[in-house]
Image (cartoon, rainbow, N blue to C red):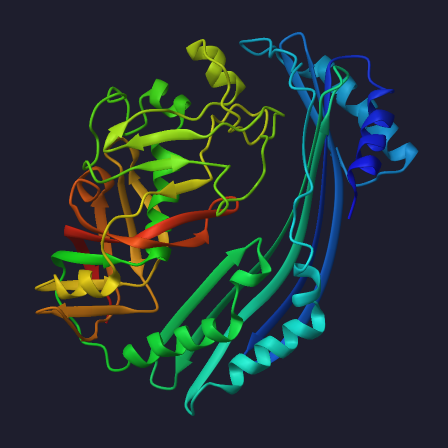
Amino acid sequence: MLNKVAAYKIIDKVLSKCNYYTMVSIMCKEEGLTRFANSGIHQNVYTAEDSVTITVIHDKKISEVTTNLLSEEGLTSAVHDAEENLKFLPQGDVELPELTSPLEIASEDYDRTLADKFNILNRASLIKSGIDLLNKDYTAAGALSLSSLVICMGNKKNIRRYSRIDTVSFNTVVMHKDGASGYSEYVTNKAKELDVVEMFASAQNKCKMGINPASIEPGSYDVILEPLAVGDLLTYMSFIGFSAKDVRTGTSFITGKLGKKVFGENITIRDDVRNENTMPLYFDFEGYGRSSLNLVENGVAKELSYDVKSALADNVEPTGHSFGYAGDGGIAVNLVMEGGDDNLEELIKSTKKGLLVSRFHYMNIVDPRQSILTALTRDGLFLIENGEIKGAVKNMRFTESMLHAFNNVTGITTGRTKVPGAFGFNYVPTLKVEDFHFTGKTE
């Protein structure tokens, strides 16, 4: 992978060719991926991708060119194309300011044990060990991936940014011959956190519980949402709610409610890049330092995520939540939800009649202004009666307002889990939500 010294040299080389204010961004990705299906490894893939993006900002115009040709000729051509394109671009509404401070934000604090623990041979061995523990009539499919990501940025104002993040991710679906399935997934930047064999065991246990599912009618149910399900809800809420641009344009469910109660008092959600359970990328894709935000504190909507354009519109400082110069608005991606005082067993025992939800899929936005989302359950939906899990239920579709759901959270576990997010990982508990609406069922 490209180290900081080598990356800065490339930036210096590109900037020496530039005539206008320019931000140079380097992205290097390497991934070793082992896939398995029908309880056998069927693919090993290694990929490496390097690219340089040249963003020229001049006269209220933004020209962007990306190249994977890092030779002298390739970089010179990319700079030339980016500057030539300015002639044909219309002027925008605002002139973006030049980034001048802090001069450097850099981090190389990645887990150096990941590369050894999850090299190609060890990935195969771990997957085989997990498959070997499966009982008869069960098969598994999934993937184990080791990846490295380097992001580096710089401009002529001596701004330099560098981050290397190594992660390992694993997912598996364990299936029974009769059609039941169970799922496990984990992503982390710490080698000690991932136990692949335990992930197989967890998925098989869910699969066993899912045999012979019953069909129940749609309607309102108390639900216990496990971390994968909670993580999906928070990710989509971030897309439709916590961006300052969406609040200003009126498409957010927080529009007109900043500083007011939007959720129950037991709900606190932060965007916290400094939390050890989120991805440690301390700057955004415009080069601004990433701030930690109190998005919702004790149910009250507190802070919003900004990129440069939305910050200019509101006359505030950017919070470092941009994903580029397109002006799509800031997006909070290091989501951390505060835990409570319960555990999963207590939540189940407290439920007279309800459903335990393992995860969702095919989630979609129905109405962002009302925070209405819809999705299907998958790989484990279970009926709870009188404080006990009675059996599996066929998958169902929910359609629910998050304003309603997060005002009806009656239980939150103390323990929290790292789950995949939009970019990196979120850190969330299990929730009990009353009066959660299911609008369809599967056969």
Q: Looking at the rendering, in which quadrant would you find the C terminus? A: bottom left
Residue 332 x %, y %: 44, 34
The relative height of residue 440 versus residue 65 in the rendered view (above or below) is below
- Asked whether residue 145 is in view, the answer is yes
Residue displayed at 17% across by 69% down: 383
Foreground: 112 or 375? 112
Residue 22 x %, y %: 73, 19
Outermost bottom residue: 136
The relative height of residue 300 versus residue 415 in the rendered view (above or below) is above
The relative height of residue 137 versus residue 415 in the rendered view (above or below) is below
Residue displayed at 25% across by 48% down: 340
Residue 47: quadrant of the picture? bottom right
Residue 395 x %, y %: 26, 66
Foreground: 182 or 105? 105
- Asked whether residue 38 is in view, the answer is no
Residue 4: quadrant of the picture? top right
Foreground: 39 or 192? 192
